[in-house]
Image: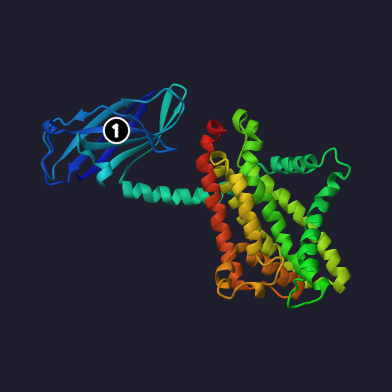
Amino acid sequence: MSARLSHTEAEARGLRIRAAFRVRNDSRETWRAEDGFAVSYHLLDPETNTVIEDGPRTLLERDIPPGDSEAVEIRFPLPPDPGRYRVYVSPMREREGWFYERGGEFLLLDLLVEGAAARIERARVFTMRRLRRELAVRSLGRALTLPWRAIFVNRSLIRAMVRRDILGRYRGSFGGLFWTVLNPLLLMLTYFYVFGIVLQARFGNDPSRSGFVLYFLAGMLPWLAFSEAAGRAPFVLLEYRNFVKKLVFPVETLPVNLVTAGLVTEAFAVVLFLAYLLLARGSVPLTALWLPVLAAPQVLFTLGLCWFLAGLGVFVRDLGQLSGFLLTLWFFLTPICYPETALPPAALPVLSRNPVFVLVRGYRDILLEGRAPDFGPLWKLWLLAALVFIAGYAWFHKLRRSFADVI
């Protein structure tokens, strides 16, 4: 079932479309109308690629033997609803299928309906292979630009929502905004008491108790922002269900708010850590300037994961409870409150691929060891973070149409 199209024409008059072309039989069989050969069209939604209408058949006016061609004209109406439509005009055979589905050429029309008139934006001959290649390139471009565009366009909204979230979290309490600093500080002190005093854990580079505090706190810095955002992500769309259901609201910004709020918490923790480091050692190493190089993939990885969890959490309501357990397991599989040497040698090659493991080691290198982070794990972290960022947004974008129906 092979065909070639040439000399194509297409015009719109109101909501009616006329398409004309010459079709050549490249198969070994004569096309006869009595054998079910005809020309028709599929009307599709270009966003979802869903067939809206399977058009009536236009029978061939004569038999077309192999190698011969015939001029064909087809006319059809469009729906009155405004929007974009896509049409595949193709030869077909009843009970056997469409030529375009078997690799044959077809006429693709991209149409825009506005008011009571249609406009043809594109009319080209395609094959499905060529179209898939074009769609893949376009999807890749959208995947690389849409997340950044969503953040940039809604940057004022994100700033306002983060401020509202942080202030609202402690509104009415005696401590107020001070709890933003006190909460991570109390958490760090709790872990320090358990591992540093009760269990007497020490790091090989500095076996003193103050050394343990520094290495432990340096490991906690990336974990604080990551765990705060990832832990809240499965609930965030349910928490703001009124925005999702009733308002035209950019819901993709809600996970961004979580990540930004987590960064604010980490920023306070970094200031406290640097102050303690200055008191304990008398100086802060210049290698601390590498911090943005580690923070950037941390943000990309966290945001991509939060988009994924937020989208999935709408459909899997148990995800919030499960994620709490997984984050606890993730924490104890990462050498934050114990040295890397405490891990079994056989497990180290596997556990060292953990992105938070790379971040923890990098933070300790630049803040405590006075050296740049290892380039090998760092570029892999950047690559993984970029992939998770793009895939997480694509997952969220694909699911967002169903959020209002499920919540």
Q: Return the residue nearer the eye: 275 or 83.
A: 275
Instruction: Point out residue 201 in the picture as x, y percentages from the top left corner.
Output: 75, 71
Identify the residue at horizontal 69%, vertical 59% (top origin).
Answer: 223
Q: Quadrant of the N terminus?
A: top left
* Left-right relation of 390 to 368: left
Identify the residue at horizontal 87%, vertical 45% (top origin).
Answer: 175
Identify the residue at horizontal 61%, vertical 68% (top origin).
Answer: 378
Model colouring: rainbow
Q: Return the residue nearer the eye: 250 or 324.
A: 324
Q: How many marks?
A: 1
* Left-right relation of 316 to 30: right
Q: Quadrant of residue 85?
A: top left
Instruction: Point out residue 275 in the picture as x, y percentages from the top left corner.
Output: 86, 64
Give SS at disc 1.
strand
**Label 1 crowd bin: few (<14), some (14–19), many (20+), radius 10 Å:** many
Q: Return the residue nearer the eye: 139 or 389.
A: 389
Whether residue 380 can be seen here: yes
Q: Is residue 282 above or below residue 110?
A: below
Query: What residue did someone put label 1 on?
Result: 41
Q: Quadrant of residue 49?
A: top left
Identify the residue at horizontal 85%, vertical 66% (top origin).
Answer: 276
Instruction: Point out residue 158 in the picture as x, y percentages from the top left corner.
Output: 70, 43
Whether residue 253 can be seen here: no
Q: Quadrant of the C terminus?
A: top right
Circle 1: residue type: Tyr
* Left-right relation of 64 to 154: left
Instruction: Point out residue 18 in the picture as x, y percentages from the top left corner.
Output: 30, 29
Q: Is residue 56 above or below residue 281?
A: above
* Left-right relation of 132 to 340: left
Which residue reaches farthest front?
A: 198
